[in-house]
Amino acid sequence: MLPLPPTYRPQSTLFIKDFPGSFKFNQSELALDKVNHCDLGVISHRQKPNSFTLFSIDQTLTNKATTMGEVDPAFIQELEHRPKLSTSEAEGIPLIDLSVLNSADAEPDLQSLVSEIGNACREWGFFQIVNHGVSVEQRQKLENACREFFAQPLEEKVKVRRDEVKIYGYYDREHTKNVRDWKEVFDFSLQNPTIVPASTDPDDKEVVEWHNQWPDNPPELREVCEEFAEELQKLGYKLMELIALSLGLPPNRFLGFFKDQTSYIRLNHYPPCPAPDLALGLGRHNDSGALTILYQDDVGGLEVKRRSDGEWIRVKPTPDALIVNVGDIIQVWSNETYKSMEHRVAVNSERERFSIPFFFYPAHYTMVQPLEELTSEKNPPKYRPYNWGKFLINKKVSNLKKLDVENIQIHQFKIQHTA
Ligand SMILES: O=C(O)CCC(=O)C(=O)O
């Protein structure tokens, strides 16, 4: 965080606003570019045209440590990735009614549901579901507990802090594509402990256990999380059956991969952000697992990158619906019949937002590769096999901090076929 040089210490915000030109500071030339709000300024670095430093005047004057209430340069997205404050709401993201799954018929007619799911996966990689069987009451209990947990002082939350060894728990410094996200999270796994490889070394066969950490407050958090996880797991299996059918596979084709699953649930809290045009709650990314099932509250902020034109569009919250998206593993298993879709989360300066994604992940020993049934001479495998556990641990640790290299991605396993 750059302090202003003494001669330009602002007496008031207006002083900064009226500041006309550039000045020297720490041997680098800086220019005041824009003042956003009454208490924020943006400095652009002449030598690094895409690099900005955002400072809070209060912070500059008092030299306080940075907190989530102020914006530090680590949060600022490159120009091309900054959110537009006016984004169109998604037209056409399919809304699928799953009530047929809860019908009294022993063998419900799934045909039209399967084709709806297939179309949604092919065209969007994203869809919303209603009548999914997850109880509203249970979800509300979790949402309330989640609000209570995040409303506590930081000293309380960090008692269950994640780090490179304790992978599940609370964290407020996650980075996506090496830019810090404007959010805090609490993670817990479905299988406790979760077994994963001890290291990313391909020859190292050792495994380790990842354990959940539960806070003392709110005391009901653990129980409501575990109940919700049960429900989402059941739904995850049903969706994987429908996806298998939509690809012309037996319904149980994917289920074995999840026997010793590494799935987890995340509670996301996006506090109001003073610079929603510069930072993102969560940077652009594709989900690396098989499938994600997400609950979002009524604030809105989830954006998907539309395939047809690359435009970011907002997924309008639908009461009691869940959002489902195809992850990279389905992209690989289906040899790109279905593709994961890039998405991100915009924040706003007024309302906090909560969301709860369930990441359905296979067992660590799964070798992820295009399914034989879905490849042929004409449609050869588009990916080399990769070990899910090694991929996962690489990703988990790299998200904890800013790195100088790209995080692991499936395109690193892509086979380039010449036409
Ligand atoms: O908060 C959201 O709406 C999306 C969350 C998400 O994509 C994630 O946590 O990976």
Image (spheres, helix red, strand yellow):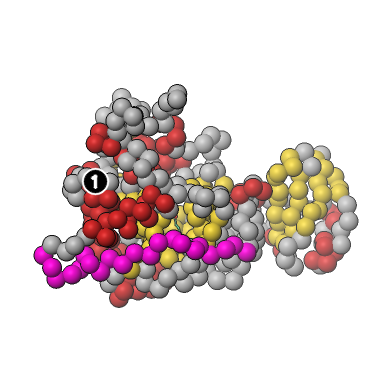
Residue kind at label 1, given as amino acid type: Gly
Relative horizontal placement of residue 104, taking residue 39 as reference (left or right): left
Q: Nearer the viewer, residue 85 or 380?
A: 380
Relative horizontal placement of residue 85, taking residue 60 as reference (left or right): left
Q: Nearer the viewer, residue 107 or 188?
A: 107
Asked whether 87 falls inside the magenta stretch, the response is yes
Where residue 234 appears, x then y in whole percent? 22, 59
Residue in the image at 55% along x and 43% along y:
178
Q: Quadrant of ligand 1?
A: bottom left
* Residue that badge 1 annotates: 248
Residue in the image at 74% along x and 58% along y:
41
Where residue 275 appears, x then y in whole percent? 65, 61
Magenta stretch, main secondary structure class: loop
Where residue 48 appears, x then y in whole percent? 73, 40
Residue in the image at 29% along x and 55% along y:
115
- Tell me if the residue at label 1 has its CB under 8 Å from ligand 1: no
Tell me the quarter of the picture where residue 222 sits. Answer: bottom left
Counting labels gives 1
Residue 220 visible, this orientation: no
Tell me the quarter of the picture where residue 98 sits. Answer: bottom left
In the image, the segment drawn in magenta is 86-106
Relative vertical location of residue 290 with respect to residue 419 in this rendering, above or below? below
Relative vertical location of residue 105 with respect to residue 196 in this rendering, above or below? below
Tell me the quarter of the picture where residue 363 sits. Answer: top left
Residue in the image at 39% along x and 68% along y:
146
